[in-house]
Image (cartoon, grey):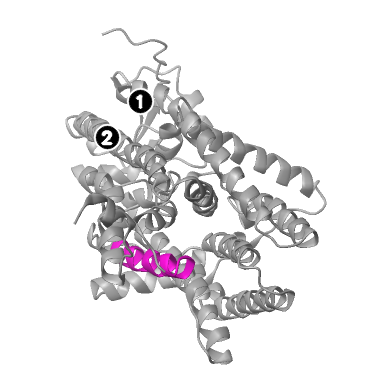
Amino acid sequence: MRMGDWLDRELGGRRVWLFFLMATFAYVLPLILADYPYIDDNWRSLAAGMGWAGEGRLFTQLFYNGLTFTDAAPNIFPLPLLIATVAMAWALSRLTFHYFAEPTVTHCLVVLAFWYNPFLLQNLSYQYDGPAMALSLVAVIFAITFRSASRVQQLVVPALLIALGLGMYQVSINVFLGLCALELLRTASARLPWPEWWRLIGWKAAQVALAWLIYFATAGAYMSQHRTQLLNGEVAPLLQIETSAARVLEKVMLLFHGGFGWVFAVLLLCAIAGAVLLIGRQETGPKKTVMGFVCFLIVPVVVFLVPGAALFFRDFNEGARTLMGFSVVLLLLFYLSHLALTALHPRLPLLLLIPLLAMLSLSFAYGRVLVLQKTFANTALNALSYDIASRPALRDAKRIYLSVTYSDHWLTGAAGSFKQLPVLHYLLNTDFYMLAENLPKAGITNVVAERERRNATRVGYQEFVPLVDSQYYRIYLLGDYGFIVMKEPKPITELHW
């Protein structure tokens, strides 16, 4: 069989699943090879701790209880990520057949963009939370693709799946709503009558409403109060939303740097051409107007859902792990671009491999940064633990307080990568020298993170002579208590090798 015939032929369910299995695994391979315990992973692996129920993520806790056959969460990485990757391959296969009746390789490329979301790399960096976040996406994909002749099943099953996704990671609701917006676009593209539009909207609204009821009756009932606090209505809530949205936009723009900017600019132009083509397919003037309005409305909705519901909560987090909705933006861009490219030539959609390859290369670049961070963290751990263990006064101290000094310049080894791909620094998000939770790995158990006394440690002990004065920190000893004060690292403005 010629290569051209293979590219044009319809793929069966097994081949589609194998394609996604290999492609999804390639994206997470750098994270598996790096094997870096990321932020919360340190204390969770130390204590086999959970703590998800208080965050409204009870089903994540149950997932690890079941997977480890314990009532805690021993570290079994990368098994959970491998399970989540296989499940995601299955979900993307379902989504492909949901969008395309007779899928080919190029159709698979469109759906693969959902998983190749660069901001999803931060989610997947968590060896504990990452697989659960991925499974929350799997749940909402199955909710959007579920079909049944029974009205009860059509309402209840998707609602249960959405509630399952919420109970693993609440941000997945943004993804489900974004996929609902794409369903409206597909409904308009198929030229379905108006009653079908309203029926679709009604079903999705009912499913979401029932899902929230199920969620708050199960996982949501365990959530602590501070996690549910909305914006203060008396302190300019619109201004708070605008400020948070601007911060998110600033972070997202870090992706469009250098060659990535050109790649996504071309992708955007192709998507615009696809939208114009979609509007032009409508039979009458009024239908074209309505289709144009739908396309015009869906774009801001999908873009808004990148941070989505997180904008309305007082505990706003601008981290990349909250930008799961960007997966839907990519899916929309690839879907419309596929329409435009197919209209020119059936094999032109293979050009979608270029942005996918760009995002895959970003994943491998991020994996190397994680390796550098792991090396730096191990070096820091060895140095600090040696300084404490080799001095009896520090080793026998009742308590040593570790101040946390945030800086963008700790990881000097990745300065070149950060300069060329600024989004890597945003994804890494480790702007500290050392976490107190790391020290028990080296047998040091009397160090704790300073919280209430942070300013006192950083400023109040500078007049004393340090017991240890190293490149990155000073250690003071006052009586039976020690204080580790970090030095501000100097930025590297230019590299000369």
Quadrant where the N terminus is found in the figure: bottom left
Residue at x 35%, y 25% (from the top left corner):
417
Q: Quadrant of residue 59?
A: bottom left
**Sooner in the amino-acid sequence: mark 2 or mark 1:** 2
Horizontal side, residue 243 vs residue 425: left or right: right
Where is 67 relative to 257, above or below? below
Which residue is at a point 71% across and 46% down the rendered structure image?
Answer: 241
Q: If the image is split into quadrants, where does the C terminus sit?
A: top left
In the rendered structure, find residue 417 and report the number of the disc placed on it: 1
- The residue closer to the viewer here, 433 or 476, is 433
Image coordinates of residue 373 in percent, x first then y, are 29, 34
Whether the magenta-drawn stretch holds residue 436 is answered as no
| Residue 279 location, quadrant | bottom right
Comparing 275 with 400, the one in front is 275
Is residue 398 visible in the rendered image? The answer is yes
How far across and how far down the image is residue 196, in percent? 68, 77
Identify the magenta region. Answer: 83-101
Q: With respect to residue 15, does 8 lie above or below?
A: above
Bin the neighbour count of mark 1 within 10 Å (Cα to Cα): few under 14, some 14-19, many 20 and up.
some
Amino acid identity at mark 2: Arg
**Foreground residue, 223 or 108?**
108
Q: In the rendered view, tell whether residue 485 sits above or below residue 49.
A: above
Q: Which residue is drawn at the image coordinates 45% and 33% (left, top)? A: 423
Which of the numbered marks, if any, corresponds to residue 368? 2
Q: Left or right? Give the position of 283 relative to 403.
A: right
Which residue is the extreme one toward the left?
A: 390
